[in-house]
Image: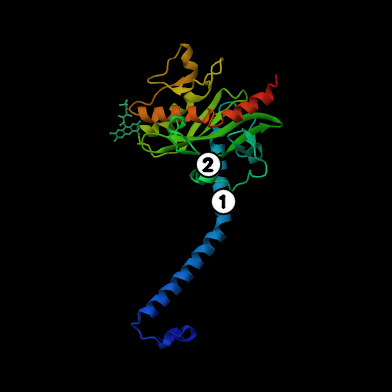
Amino acid sequence: MDDLTDDSRWIGLRHWPRESATRAIVITLLVCTVCSALIATTVSVLRPYRDQNRALQQTARIQEMIATVPGLEDVVDPLASDQLESRLVELATGAYIDDAADERFDPRKAARDPETSLALPRERDLAGIGRRANHATVFLVSEGDELRLLVLPVYGAGYISTLYGYLALDTDLNTIRGLSFYEHGETPGLGSEIENPRWREQWSGKWLRDPSGELRIEVAPGPAPSRDEDARYQVDAISGATRTSRGVTNLLRFWLGPDGFGPYLQRLRSERDPS
Ligand SMILES: Cc1cc2nc3c(=O)[nH]c(=O)nc-3n(C[C@H](O)[C@H](O)[C@H](O)COP(=O)(O)O)c2cc1C
């Protein structure tokens, strides 16, 4: 009791019997209030560090991916982040949102919030994500004023998990330079083969659309043809992981389509070829 003397006098606890329910409730409330205040203070003090770390982690993943893109090593130093610019895109219009391109944008949180996302009807939800954030951060690698690589974040349902990756496109906005998945929970040795460098390297050089503009990129139902015209748009399926393979096709088709980066890519193309 002695160590409670000052506080007890202040709130009159000293006069309450030891077993009093009111005393127990007041002490519990006091402890809860102090702990909540401590937690709230810690969260707000640490928030800037968390945001900074998230941004650094994202940059590191993209640099890692860029380092694997053939032909870029002579123009881009993957460790020089001044050659890597991030922009926030409004997906519905494809326009850049200039003042909001800050490090605090959290795409996963935005996709959960009905205020900042779009509910996707089942027939349009190819990627199986339910809601799509209204904005997305894209990454541009430039040499001087010239765009050398455009990196788009893509994600969607696999077999038992959501697959998160980055798709890197060449300056023609139709040729893939790389596709890498950095987070998923697929089965090791089956779906997780999407991380295997041998599977990954097949993506480089594939085309998204055919000359008529039809979106044709896909993981083939089996081994990709090596000669015929489809070979330009297909990579091998992962054996024993048909559902993961199909998930990759579906998420690419979604993110390159009208509810994904379609309007953005269309805008970039028409700015590049105004006729
Ligand atoms: C333990 C276990 C883990 C599996 N993991 C995966 C996986 O990561 N990705 C996947 O596509 N299929 C996985 N499968 C296989 C699927 O159940 C399915 O049989 C496979 O995708 C082939 O699909 P299909 O029968 O429609 O061709 C797994 C199956 C088992 C039993």
Q: Residue furthest front?
A: 121
What x and y, as percent, mark residue 191? 37, 32
Task: Indicate the quadrant of ligand 1 in the picture.
Answer: top left
What x and y, as percent, mark residue 227? 46, 11
Which quarter of the image is occupied by the C terminus?
A: top right
Q: Is residue 199 above or below residue 29?
A: above
Q: Residue furthest top?
A: 228
Neighbour tally class for label 2: few under 14, some 14-19, many 20 plus, Cα within 10 Å: some
Residue 158, image quadrant: top left
Instruction: Report the label total.
Output: 2
Q: Viewer-proximal residue, 232 or 25?
A: 25
Q: Is residue 156 left or right of residue 82?
A: left
Residue type, numbered disc 2 = Ser
Q: Is residue 198 left or right of residue 89?
A: left
Mark nearer the N terminus (1 vs 2): 1
Image point (64%, 44%), residue name: 100
Residue type, numbered disc 1 = Asp
Kindly identify which residue carries mark 2: 117
Q: Viewer-proximal residue, 107 or 16?
A: 16
Residue 121, image quadrant: top left
Front: mark 1 or 2: 2
Confirm or reject: label 1 Cβ below 8 Å from ligand 1. no
Q: Is residue 188 above or below residue 13?
A: above
Image point (45%, 23%), residue name: 218
Kindly identify which residue carries mark 1: 51
Q: Identify the secondary structure beneath mark 2.
A: strand
Image point (47%, 83%), residue name: 11
In three-dimensional space, the C-alpha distance between marks 1 and 2, rounded to whole angstroms, equals 21 Å
The answer, for residue 72, to whether it is visible in the render is: no
Which quarter of the image is occupied by the N terminus?
A: bottom left
Q: Is residue 141 left or right of residue 244?
A: right
Q: Identify the secondary structure beneath mark 1.
A: helix
